[in-house]
């Protein structure tokens, strides 16, 4: 409580000006009465202002919903000093920020203009609570409710409850993303089962995007490849999710060096394609020892024998690297026969705990 009495005036003895709503005695010095203490009209105007802020909070929640539903995540806006950033994120931040801000601003305005600002003196007492104290606390609470004008201005009470009821909605609405799947994919779990590889898609080199002819891969060589559709898919989706699942390595060995294949007719003349995503925790791998035909993951040293169905020969990975069935088209370019026949990447639900196939 401030000692500065220069801005304080003695408490009015006239209860009709500033009424002490508390049971405790009023402090000797009190702040000057506010306009809203003296004029019922001013008090109603302030109440309307508070209610307007609470209502506007609800409007911004509705705008949040509109931005979340109708704006594209790939839209961008130019913000001075920040550069180009995602337009939807700006809209979501602004609308939700304004919704919360208006509740706060309305509450502060309510407290400053309408709640009682009478300063009271509470005598010190024992810390032990007696039944009387408990009862007294309840009475003080009731008095606080009275002094806050919670009962007197039902419009504030209702609009605040309205605003508070709407504010959690952005969190709930955001959960929609858990159920978002591309067209034709029934549920998020199914998304983990497929990549964008389809029958007939050419294998194209990573970075350059050039299709790969079978004769371009020498025995012992390794090429990093993607599906030819990848660029278009990334442009449509605006993210790298498809790349993270579809990336492959293509290696070539002498056909008689191949001990076993996951898909026996899925290789072409010693050329085999495997997922590039480690089945341990998903690091991309292309460290290949051509003499031993082993693929080594640099993250935790899982090692896969590509000549023997890419089985795990060392390290923490729980299963082989999935094979992509390939062949060549009429022009001699490598193409996929289909998508992978099993999920790629760290598929924990298939880990058996045993090293090997
Ligand atoms: S991510 Fe490859 S071994 Fe851990």
Image: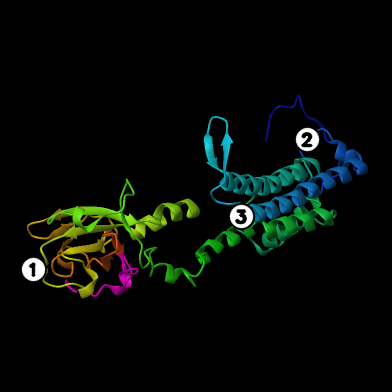
Magenta stretch: dominant secondary structure: loop
> Residue drawn 81% across and 49% down?
21
Q: Nearer the viewer, residue 186 or 196?
A: 196
The magenta stretch spans residue 116: no
Looking at the image, which residue sits at the far top? 6
Category of crowding for the residue at label 1, using alpha-carbon neighbours closer than 10 angstroms: few (below 14), some (14–19), many (at least 20): few
Say which quadrant the C terminus sits in: bottom left
**Residue 201 x/y as whole percent:** 36, 62
Q: Nearer the viewer, residue 47 or 128?
A: 47
Position of residue 10 relative to residue 280, above or below, is above
Task: Judge depth for marks 1 and 3 and give the one in front.
Answer: 1
Label whose residue precedes the other's in the sequence (1 or 3): 3
Does residue 229 appear left or right of residue 335 in this picture? right
Label whose residue precedes the other's in the sequence (1 or 2): 2
**Residue 72 x/y as whole percent:** 58, 52
Q: Name the residue carrying label 3.
A: 68
Let me know if residue 235 appears in the view: yes
Q: CA distance from mark 2 to mark 3?
A: 55 Å
Q: Secondary structure at mark 1?
A: helix
Q: Nearer the viewer, residue 81 or 126?
A: 81
- Span shown in magenta: 336-357
Does residue 271 appear left or right of residue 53 in this picture? left
The answer to which image quadrant residue 31 occupies is top right
> Residue drawn 79% across and 45% down?
116
Let me know if residue 12 appears in the view: no
Label whose residue precedes the other's in the sequence (2 or 3): 2
Q: Name the residue carrying label 2.
A: 28
**Residue 91 x/y as whole percent:** 62, 46
Q: Secondary structure at mark 2?
A: loop
């Amino acid at each position: 409580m401030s000692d500065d009495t220069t801005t304080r005036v003695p408490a009015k003895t006239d209860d009709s000006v500033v009424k002490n709503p508390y049971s405790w005695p009023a402090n000797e010095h009190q702040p000057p009465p506010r306009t809203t203490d003296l004029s019922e009209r001013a008090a109603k105007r302030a109440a309307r202002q508070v209610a307007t802020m609470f209502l506007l909070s609800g409007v911004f929640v509705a705008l949040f919903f509109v931005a979340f539903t109708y704006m594209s995540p790939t839209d961008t806006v130019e913000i001075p000093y920040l550069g180009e950033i995602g337009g939807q994120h700006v809209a979501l931040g602004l609308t939700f920020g304004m919704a919360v801000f208006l509740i706060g601003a309305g509450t502060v305005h309510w407290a400053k203009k309408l709640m009682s600002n009478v300063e009271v003196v509470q005598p010190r007492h024992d810390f032990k609570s007696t039944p009387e104290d408990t009862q007294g606390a309840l009475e003080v609470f009731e008095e606080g409710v009275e002094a806050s004008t919670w009962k007197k201005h039902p419009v504030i009470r209702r609009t605040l409850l309205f605003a508070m009821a709407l504010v959690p909605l952005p969190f709930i609405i955001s959960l929609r993303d858990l159920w978002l799947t591309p067209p034709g994919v029934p549920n998020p779990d199914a998304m983990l089962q497929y990549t964008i590889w389809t029958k007939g898609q050419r294998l194209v080199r990573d970075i350059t995007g050039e299709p790969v002819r079978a004769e371009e891969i020498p025995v012992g060589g390794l090429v990093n490849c993607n599906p030819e559709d990848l660029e278009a898919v990334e442009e449509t989706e605006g993210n790298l999710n498809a790349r993270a699942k579809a990336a492959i390595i293509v290696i070539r060995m002498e056909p008689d060096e191949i001990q076993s294949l996951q898909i026996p007719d899925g290789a072409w003349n010693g050329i085999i394609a495997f997922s590039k995503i480690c089945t341990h925790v998903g690091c991309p791998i292309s460290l290949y020892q051509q003499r031993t035909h082993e693929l080594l993951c640099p993250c935790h040293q899982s090692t896969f024998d590509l000549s023997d169905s890419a089985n795990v020969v060392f390290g923490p990975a729980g299963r082989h690297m999935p094979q992509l069935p390939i062949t060549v088209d009429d022009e001699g370019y490598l193409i996929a026969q289909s998508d992978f026949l099993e999920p790629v990447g760290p598929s924990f639900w298939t880990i058996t705990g045993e090293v090997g196939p």
